[in-house]
Image (tube, rainbow, N blue to C red):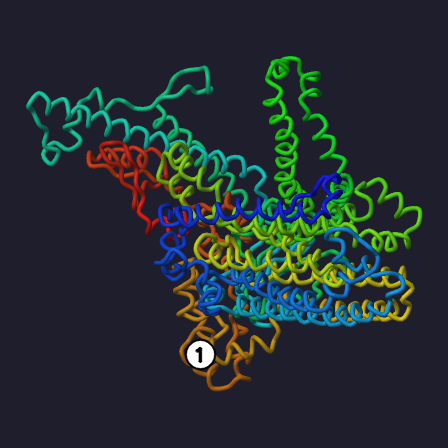
Amino acid sequence: MADVPPSGQVKDVSSVSSFISAVIFNSAVALAFYTAFIVLRRRFPLVYAPRTFLVPAKNRSPPLERWYSWLTLHSRSDDEVIINRIGPDNWAVIFYMRQLFRVFLFIALVGVIILFPTYITGNAGNPGLNKMTIGNVGDDQTARLWGTLFLTWAFIAVVLYIIFKLLNKAAELRHKFLLSPENRASLSGYTLVVRDIPRSLRDPVVLRKLLERIQPNKVLDVILTRDVRELKKLHTKHVGDRDSLEKASTTYIKTVCVNFAKHIASLKKDGQSVDLEDGGVHAIPPEIYNMRPTHKKMMIYGEKVDSISEYIREMRELETQLKEKRSVAYTGSDKFESAAFIIFSDLFAPHVAALANIHGTPGVMDDKQACVDPNDVIWDNLQMPFYQRQIRGLIALLVCVGLVIFWGIITAFLAGIASLDQLTKTFPFLGFFNDLPASVKGIIQGILPTVLVAILFSLLPMILRFLSKFAGEMTNTAVEKTLINQYYGFLVFNVLLIVTISGSVFQAIQTIIDNPPKVFEILARSIPGVSTFFVNYVILLALSGPAGELLQIANLILKPLKLRFLASTPRAIWRQSQPLVYSSGVPMASHSFIATVGVTYMTIAPLVSIMCLMYFGFWYIAYSYQMQYVYTTKNQTGGLYLYAAAKQLFVALYIHELVIAGLFLLKTAWIQAALAFLALAITIAFNRYANMFGKLMVSVPAKAAVDESSNRHLTINTDVAKELTSNQAWREEVEGTNTIHGKESRANLVDSENEAWADHNTVSERDLDKDTPAEKNARTNSSEDTEKYEGPDDHEKQFLHPALRPDPLTVWIPSDSLQVHQKIKEEVESGCEAKVIWEGAVIDLTGKITVTTDVIARGTEP
């Protein structure tokens, strides 16, 4: 993450000797990190290569045999193979680094050949590294600025080319993802989410007829969300009790195994033995078998109870309450909330419906999204009213703007109170620090403010994510995409603009208020002078960032500790063993910001471009390894983050064009300034054209769907139904609609491209008269219907809040050679509805629990 530097660091950085010293020191640290990574990579595959064995077989990367193989991954891998293996989002990060590396390779080479000689031989007399900037061109040397102007246009053209290459690739990835076999094998690929449904339309039958007007004969089911306010707390406690039961049961099995091993050792010492094959669990002495875990009901006081029995009792009571609450939620239209999942019969239909105007009132049923994964949904936000989201969004925006503007003040305040003198005055009990030697106090004083500010920085993404959720974002993907833009804006304002203008947020704001046009003049005067700071800033990040990313010091230390002390059950081991999930928000925004710095200075201080070349080169190598061998993605978006990052490069062009035009004006190069403003106008035109890609990122174009249908069937057929995560109930329903799923219909789809969209390949009119499962559920208001109703079917469960899903919980315990796990299974399943399993989990007589990698690699928690 790119930290905001203290304003004092901006001064006195133009010395060549200090620059060389900084490069040597940071290079030594980076070299040490890379060496440690090479040594540790093979020894700790759980940290450095989990994708070779802890993901499904089709997603695994081949092990690297040689110690240097990771250095050449970027040049010897096929893109399509990598996309299929790691997913479009992880590959998009590699692609983004590759394109930025290439653009800065061109800019740096041309800058070294043309701009360096032009600026170094200037007569302005700038010292140190400032001799390599446009500021070293004297006022009587304006003819030299024609070369600067020519390269400005050339570099802008190259950056625009890269932007549109990124946008086209993002759209291509998005469409391939939406039409991919994985998406066609998932119900979410056929689903549209609609929010802000008025009460008069909260009926599955009414909604179905309404959506049929948009996509005739293609609506298979309508699933309205339900009120779960009373259920959520019960469900959370139910899951918590399940986890506690697993922990207590595993502790009991471990206690019995360990103590029995000691008992065996004692018998062997006395010359006796025990045959477990004959005795089994009966061979365990009663005093060991009865060593069951206990706890106090009220945490630290109250009656001591048997933990296993108590958690079983609590689960049984909660199951009864949950059944009653779910029955009420399932029946009665008054329990319907303002959001619904609409399931269509083909893959293209939800995208068409997402673009339609359903209701005549602004804000009503206007928020629609196709292909939403239920696991990506923020359920508490799904039914948040439209006007509440507007108010919350405004509050979140104001807080976000306040954070951006006043961040420098906040960090300065924290750094101030973090001084030892201030702390000992505020907190007298810390007075012993005054007795420490001066050298020790100096070290603490130097580290403490930095650590405190670093902690605050680590909290910023969490704060921004919280604000997005507070504002009512529907999915975690939307939260992460918002974070990319917010964090990028934060860096541009606090690092680039504030540092450049004055180093003081108050002075900058006052200048903007007093004379807004003067801001660009100030930027033009200041940017060449502070370019050497950004040279040091970027090279520091280029050397330390990728090396730290590869070494993963925190993960290397914490993962073994978590497995050792926090993973006391098979489920906890499963969770702690999962590969790291790559969250795009912060890193993508940081990389876009460095690209913005490089583009801003590309003809002003070409040395910055060389540092950016190193930055993106090192990150390209690092991400080529990390994405293939370390990171997974929780929810694939198919290029949405790449699209957001590409659009941010327009901001970089705007800043560069305004600054270079201001520099030309300062040097009275009027024609060059006019041509620079012309470049700005052209960039605005290209930006407006680029905005059209926004629609392509939302929905699949008809042309792409037609092209795909010539090779694959976009309607749900029997083969796809068998692959769906929902099983028998869904398969029986869709197989019954033979006009969609029959072999004859599929043959017709192949025969003619036009017939692929004909009515005989969709639900027939007579099928509209049949009630779907959700409609049947909506009509169970009578006591007679309620008695017959058995809850949602398998496919409907996927689109219900987790608290509404009636499936019994799974208690996962390890199996043991003493068969204690069998006794626990009998006790649990006779006492509540939970199902006990020990799939892939074994505990030995030493108490060590192992979980097979096949179970961990499945990616689905048992």
Please indicate whether residue 620 sits to the left or right of residue 297 in the image. Answer: right
- The residue located at (40%, 51%) in the rendering is 50
Q: Which residue is mark 1?
A: 746
Kindly indicate the quadrant of the structure image that contains residue 693: bottom right
Kindly indicate the quadrant of the structure image that contains residue 252: top left
Residue 730 spot, x, y in % from top left: 43, 61
User: Is any part of residue 213 visible from this angle?
Assistant: no
Amino acid identity at mark 1: Arg
User: Is any part of residue 793 visible from this angle?
Assistant: yes
Q: Between 764 and 121, which is closer to the camera in this rendering?
A: 121
Kindly indicate the quadrant of the structure image that contains residue 768: bottom right
Q: Residue furthest bottom?
A: 751
Please count the marks in the image.
Answer: 1
Q: Is residue 794 above or below residue 770?
A: above
Residue 757 spot, x, y in % from top left: 55, 79
Residue 118 spot, x, y in % from top left: 77, 66
Residue 553 spot, x, y in % from top left: 48, 41
Q: Between 476 and 456, which is closer to the camera in this rendering?
A: 456
Please indicate whether residue 59 sits to the left or right of residue 12 in the image. Answer: left
Q: Residue furthest left?
A: 271
Please indicate whether residue 258 sits to the left or right of residue 551 in the image. Answer: left
- The residue located at (58%, 47%) in the rendering is 24
